Amino acid sequence: MDEHSSKRLQTPILLYIGSSGRSAFSVVGRHFLLVLRTGTYWFIVNPKSGSSADVESVRFIRDYLRQRHQPMRLKLTRSLAHAGELAQEAIGAGAAAVVVSGGDGTVRTVAEAMAGSAIPILILPAGTENLLAQELGIDGSRKTSLKMLENGTVRKLDLGRANERYFMAIAGVGFDAQVVRRINQFRSGHITHSDYIWPICRTFWEYGFPHLRVEADGELICDEPSLVFVGNITRYAVGLPIHPYADCSDGLLDITIYRYRRRRELLLHSLRTVLHQADRSRQVSRHTCKEVTISCPEADVPVQLDGDPGPTLPLSIQIVPAAARVLTPPPPPGRAYHPPVRFYHLRHCLCG
Ligand SMILES: [Mg+2]
């Protein structure tokens, strides 16, 4: 066997040997090796998330596994807490993998319940933003889902722990968290981007300028009116590059601080961020650390974790390195990981 053939045969096996300790493989069509984990695939599906296209995506993967005689269990969530309970049930049963269909909140809850487990999570994005899925190159298409099942890479991701609650993508303190708080006051099911318009407008006119005190690894980095993001991925809602240099596997938290005392400064920050020009402003600073504390003695400042209401201040956030394992699409030649999905929202507007 020549060196090139040897690499082709070894790579998929090495990618999949891990949690269950056993793997199966066979020759199928163009794919020289089809590797499926032995054991039961657990589906955790949030019925409040997603459109009919997202339901079809779950059916497609379920039928694909059924045709290959893979044992499965499919559970619908009744709440976010129930999603966590189902994930713990899957761990107890020694699942081969956990397939999660839902938004960032559902994925976060499952990852939190599975923190430290070697069982991989396969994400079928079905939320409004799907921030983590975008970051990992998961676009929700059947083609990508199949790639993850057949040749995917198991990537170890860091989690953020904020006052004993976990997040995978981003925590926001201030303006955006107030928008999340408002939208959750009337939310009853799946929400779209248009649902955010009124809460954003109302928050823009009513929200004040809370004085935030931020310490990163014990060093004071901000003590003035500001908007603070702590995250582990590069982009936030509608693709805003809030943490353009973040790496979700580097063992560090990324912090971006927007200082502002007037509403027009908030607008300018938004515009500069959209245009990838935020680094040119002296009112914007970026930091990396392993632990950050945020406090505000003067007001009730809201916090959001991955788009859901979070704990109240004071907030203590630590990085939990390599706490979650997620199946991602195979990387292109020469790269360690698949790059983020570009123009995610535009694609879904055009393709459904
Ligand atoms: Mg990081």
Image (spheres, rainbow, N blue to C red):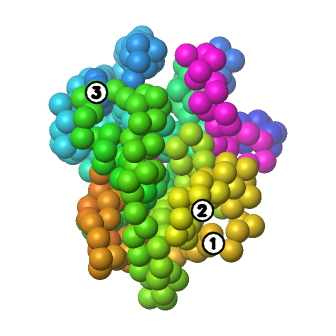
* Whether label 2 touches label 1, CB < 8 Å: yes
On the rendered structure, is 136 left or right of 119?
Answer: right
Question: Which stretch is magenta?
Answer: 325-352
Which of the labelled discs sits on residue 283, or is there none?
Answer: 1
Is disc 3 placed on a helix, strand or loop? loop
Q: Amino acid at mark 3?
A: Gly
Give me the residue at 60% from left, 48% from top: 240
Residue 68, percent from left and from top: 43, 15
User: Looking at the image, is mark 2 or mark 1 nearer the viewer?
Assistant: 2
* Distance from Cα at disc 3 to Cα at disc 2: 34 Å
**Label 3 or label 2, whichever comes before in sequence order:** 3
User: Looking at the image, is mark 3 or mark 2 nearer the viewer?
Assistant: 2
Q: Residues within 10 Å of mark 3 (few under 14, many from 20)?
A: few
Is disc 2 placed on a helix, strand or loop? helix
Residue behind mark 3:
189
Q: Nearer the viewer, residue 281 or 50?
A: 281
Above or below residue 229? Residue 114 is above
Q: Nearer the viewer, residue 137 or 267?
A: 267
Give me the residue at 53% from left, 26% from top: 140
Ligand 1 neighbours mark 2 (CB distance < 8 Å): no
12 within the magenta span: no
Residue behind mark 2:
265
Above or below residue 72? Residue 115 is below
**Label 1 or label 3, whichever comes before in sequence order:** 3
Q: Amino acid at mark 1?
A: Gln
